[in-house]
Image (tube, rainbow, N blue to C red):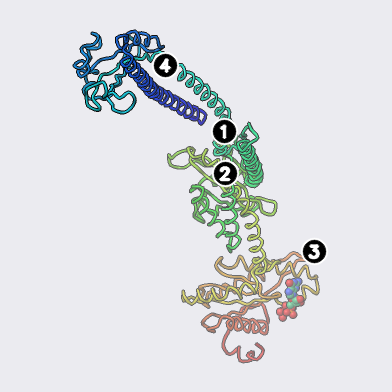
C-alpha cells in the first residue's frame, strides 16, 4: 500500500471516528440538557401550582382549581398537569375531585416517601418527560402550611404530575447534530483532500527514488526523479538526480578506461557496476601478477606462474605455451601446466613447420571459441571426451611472435570462458614486456658467456661453471680430461693473409672441435687462438685417442680463404683431473705445460702431461 493511500485511510479513519464521537457526545449532552431543563421546568411549574392552590385556599376559591389546571395546559409543550391528594388532606378536608384521588404507582411512591420522580418514556412515537413533585407541609413561609393542615412538619400533602413533550427539543437537537456532523464531515473531507495534495508529491517522489535506486542496483544510473515541489521533497529529488548523474558519469569514465585496458566490450544488459568492479579486480590481479613476474628470475618461472593463474583464476587446466625456437620451428614449453611435455593440442607438425600455426603465421589472436575450426592445426582430444575449443594469443617479442599461449576449454564452457578472455589478454599483455626484458637479459648473459665469433663458450663461462663441473665430477667420481690446444704458427696466417683469414681459420677450427666431441663435453675458446676441451667421464687413454683424432682431422682440413686454400696443424696438451691435480685450474695449467712441450717437440702433436714437465715451469705460472 503506498503512502498516499495510507494517509487517506488514516485521515479518513480519524475523521469518521471523530465524527462518531462528536455525534455520540452531542446526543448525550442534548439528552442530559433536556432532562435537566425539563426537570427545572416541571419543578417551577409545580411550585406555581402549589402557590396557586395555597392562594386559592386562603381566598376560598379552592373549588375553582380545575379551571386553573386546565388553563395551565395551554402552556406550550405541557401535555398534562394533574394534582393528587394525600390521605391526610382527604381525612381533614374530605375527598377531592375523582381524578385527584386515583394515584398511579409513581404517585403512590412519591406520596409515600416525599421524593420527586422523573422519567422519559415513549408515547406513540413521541418522547415525553414526566415529573411527579411532592408537596410537603412546612412551617416556614407565609402562610404557614401547618396553620391550616393538621399534620406534622414534612408530611406529604399531595403531589403534582406534569408531562412535557420532548419532541420539539429532540428535533432541534437532531437538526443541530446533523449540522455539526455535516460541517465536520465537510471539514474532514477538505482536510483529506488538502493532505492528499500535500502528501502526493512525497509519495510519488519516494516511488520515483525507489525506481531509480532499483535501476542503479542493476548498474543503470540513467534513472531520474521528477522534481514536483520546491520544498524539501523537491530538494530530495534534485539531490538524488545529482547523485545519480555523478555515479553515472563516474562509472562511465571508469568503465571507459577499464574497457580500454581490458578490451572487453560492455553489453546493454550488463550490470555496469558489477562489470566495472569485475574489471577493476581483474586489472588489480593482473597488476599484482606483473609485479610478481618482474621479480621472477627466468622465463620458466614466469610461465609457471602464468600457468597457475590460468588454472586457479580462470579454471583453465588444458593449455599450451609454445616458444619460437627457430625461423620455422616451435617448441612446446609447457603443456597442461607441465614444462617439457609433448605437444598435445596441436598437430605436432607445427613444431617443424611453424607457419601451420595460425597465431604464429598471422601474429594475431585466433579465436576458436566463437569460430570453431578456424585453425586446422588444432587437435581434438585423442579420447572420446567432449569436443574442445581453443583460443590462441601470440606474444610478440622484438616485433615477431616469440611465444604462443593456447587455451583449451570444453565446448560447454566456451561461452563462460569467452567472458574471461579479455582478462586473460590483460595478463598476456602484462607478461609480454616482462618476457621481452627477461629474454634480453638472458641473451645478454648468454652473449657474455659466449664467444661471438666462434659461437663457443668463453673463459668466463668456464669460470662460472667450474664449481658445478667439479662438484658433479667428484660426486659421480668421474675423471675429466682437459685438452688445451693451439694453432701452430697462427701468427703467419694473420701476417700473410690478413686478420679476416685468421678469423676464418679460427671459425673452421671451432666447428671441427665441436663436432669431434660428445654433446656433454665442453669446447671453450680459452683466449686468442687457444682452446680448452673438457671431456667428461673419459680416461687418459681415451682422451689421448680423441685428441689425436682432433689433431689429425685439423691437419687434413682445408680452409678456403679468398683465392688460397690453407692447411693448418694444432698442438694439444692433455692433463687429467683429478688424476694429475686435485685442483681444476692447476690441471688446466698442467695441460698448458703439456701444450708447451708439444710446441717444443715440433708442434702438430698431442702431449700427455707428466709431473716432471712442471718442474721447469712452476715459476712462470
Ligand atoms: N685473426 C685472429 N688472430 C688472432 C685472434 N686471437 C689471437 N690471434 C693471433 O694469434 C696469434 C698467436 O700467435 P702466437 O701466440 O705468437 O703464436 P703462433 O703464431 O700461433 O705460433 P705458435 O708458437 O705455434 O703458437 C697472434 O698473432 C694473435 O694476434 C683472433 O681472434 N683472430
Q: Position of residue 580 (x, y in %)?
A: 54, 84
CA gap, disc 1 to disc 4? Answer: 49 Å
- Report the mark closest to the observer, 4 or 3: 4
Indicate which disc residue 563 carries. Answer: 3
- Are the residues tagged 4 and 3 within 8 Å (C-beta)? no
Q: Earlier in the sequence, mark 2 or mark 3?
A: 2
Q: Position of residue 500 (x, y in %)?
A: 78, 68
Q: Can you tell which quarter of the image residue 251 is in?
A: top right
Q: Is residue 360 visible?
A: no
Q: Which residue is mark 1?
A: 202
Q: Secondary structure at mark 2?
A: helix
Q: Which residue is mark 4?
A: 169
Q: Which residue is mark 2?
A: 421
- In this picture, residue 504 sits left or right of residue 81: right
CA gap, disc 4 to disc 3? Answer: 153 Å
Q: Secondary structure at mark 4?
A: helix
- Report the mark closest to the observer, 1 or 4: 4
The residue at 58%/42% (across/down) is 273
Residue nearest the viewer, comparing 92 with 237: 92
Residue nearest the viewer, comparing 80 with 368: 80
Q: Earlier in the sequence, mark 4 or mark 3?
A: 4
Disc 2 residue: CB within 8 Å of ligand 1: no
Q: Is residue 7 above or below residue 74?
A: below
* Ligand 1 quadrant in view: bottom right
Q: Is residue 470 above or below residue 404?
A: below
Amino acid at each position: 500500500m503506498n503512502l498516499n493511500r495510507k494517509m487517506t485511510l488514516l485521515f479518513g479513519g480519524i475523521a469518521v471516528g471523530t465524527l462518531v464521537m462528536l455525534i455520540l457526545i452531542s446526543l448525550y449532552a442534548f439528552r442530559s440538557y433536556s432532562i435537566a431543563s425539563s426537570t427545572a421546568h416541571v419543578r417551577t411549574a409545580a411550585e406555581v401550582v402549589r402557590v396557586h392552590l395555597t392562594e386559592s385556599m386562603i381566598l376560598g376559591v379552592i373549588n375553582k382549581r380545575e379551571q386553573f389546571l386546565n388553563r395551565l395546559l395551554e402552556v406550550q409543550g405541557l401535555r398534562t398537569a394533574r394534582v393528587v391528594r394525600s390521605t391526610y388532606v382527604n381525612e381533614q378536608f374530605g375527598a377531592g375531585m375523582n381524578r385527584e384521588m386515583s394515584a398511579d404507582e409513581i404517585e403512590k411512591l412519591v406520596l409515600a416517601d416525599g421524593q420527586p420522580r422523573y422519567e422519559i418514556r415513549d408515547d406513540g412515537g413521541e418522547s415525553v418527560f414526566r415529573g411527579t413533585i411532592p408537596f410537603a407541609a412546612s412551617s416556614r413561609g407565609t402562610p404557614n402550611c401547618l396553620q391550616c393542615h393538621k399534620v406534622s412538619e414534612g408530611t406529604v400533602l399531595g403531589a403534582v404530575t406534569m408531562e412535557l413533550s420532548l419532541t420539539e427539543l429532540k428535533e432541534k437537537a437532531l437538526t443541530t447534530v446533523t449540522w455539526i456532523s455535516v460541517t465536520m464531515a465537510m471539514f474532514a473531507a477538505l482536510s483529506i483532500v488538502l493532505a492528499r495534495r500535500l502528501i502526493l508529491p512525497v509519495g510519488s517522489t519516494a516511488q520515483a527514488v525507489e525506481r531509480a535506486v532499483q535501476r542503479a542496483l542493476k548498474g543503470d544510473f540513467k534513472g531520474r526523479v521528477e522534481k514536483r515541489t520546491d520544498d524539501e521533497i523537491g530538494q530530495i529529488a534534485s539531490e538524488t538526480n545529482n547523485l545519480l548523474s555523478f555515479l553515472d558519469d563516474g562509472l562511465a569514465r571508469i568503465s571507459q578506461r577499464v574497457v580500454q585496458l581490458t578490451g572487453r566490450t560492455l553489453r546493454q544488459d550488463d550490470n555496469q557496476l558489477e562489470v566495472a568492479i569485475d574489471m577493476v579486480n581483474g586489472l588489480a590481479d593482473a597488476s599484482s601478477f606483473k609485479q610478481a613476474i618482474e621479480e621472477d628470475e627466468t622465463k620458466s618461472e614466469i610461465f609457471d606462474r602464468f600457468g597457475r593463474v590460468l588454472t586457479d583464476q580462470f579454471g583453465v587446466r588444458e593449455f599450451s605455451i609454445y616458444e619460437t625456437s627457430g625461423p620455422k620451428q616451435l617448441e612446446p614449453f609447457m603443456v597442461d601446466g607441465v614444462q617439457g611435455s609433448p605437444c598435445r593440442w596441436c598437430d605436432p607438425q607445427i613444431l617443424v613447420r611453424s607457419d601451420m600455426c595460425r597465431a604464429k603465421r598471422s601474429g594475431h589472436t585466433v579465436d576458436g571459441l566463437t569460430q570453431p575450426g578456424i585453425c586446422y592445426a588444432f587437435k581434438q582430444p585423442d579420447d572420446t571426451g567432449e569436443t574442445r575449443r581453443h583460443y590462441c594469443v601470440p606474444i610478440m617479442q622484438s616485433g615477431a611472435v616469440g611465444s604462443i599461449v593456447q587455451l583449451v576449454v570444453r565446448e560447454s564452457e566456451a561461452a563462460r570462458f569467452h567472458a574471461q578472455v579479455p582478462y586473460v589478454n590483460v595478463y598476456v599483455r602484462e607478461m609480454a614486456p616482462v618476457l621481452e626484458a627477461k629474454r634480453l637479459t638472458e641473451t645478454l648473459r648468454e652473449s657474455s658467456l659466449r664467444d661471438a665469433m666462434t659461437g663457443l663458450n668463453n673463459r668466463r663461462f668456464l669460470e662460472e661453471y667450474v664449481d658445478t663441473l667439479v662438484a658433479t665430477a667428484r660426486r659421480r667420481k668421474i675423471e675429466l680430461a682437459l685438452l688445451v690446444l693451439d694453432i701452430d704458427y697462427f701468427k703467419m696466417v694473420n701476417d700473410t693473409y690478413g686478420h679476416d683469414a685468421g678469423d676464418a681459420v679460427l671459425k673452421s677450427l671451432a666447428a671441427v672441435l665441436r663436432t669431434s666431441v660428445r654433446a656433454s663435453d665442453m669446447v671453450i675458446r680459452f683466449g686468442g687462438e687457444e682452446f680448452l676441451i673438457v671431456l667428461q667421464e673419459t680416461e687418459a687413454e681415451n682422451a689421448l685417442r680423441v685428441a689425436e683424432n682432433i689433431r689429425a682431422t685439423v691437419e687434413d682440413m682445408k680452409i678456403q680463404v679468398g683465392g688460397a686454400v690453407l692447411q693448418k696443424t694444432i698442438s694439444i696438451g692433455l692433463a687429467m683431473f683429478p688424476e694429475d691435480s686435485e685442483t681444476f685450474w692447476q690441471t688446466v695449467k698442467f695441460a698448458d705445460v703439456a701444450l708447451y712441450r708439444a710446441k717444443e717437440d715440433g708442434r702438430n702433436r698431442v702431449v700427455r702431461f707428466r709431473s716432471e714437465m712442471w718442474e721447469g715451469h712452476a715459476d712462470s705460472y
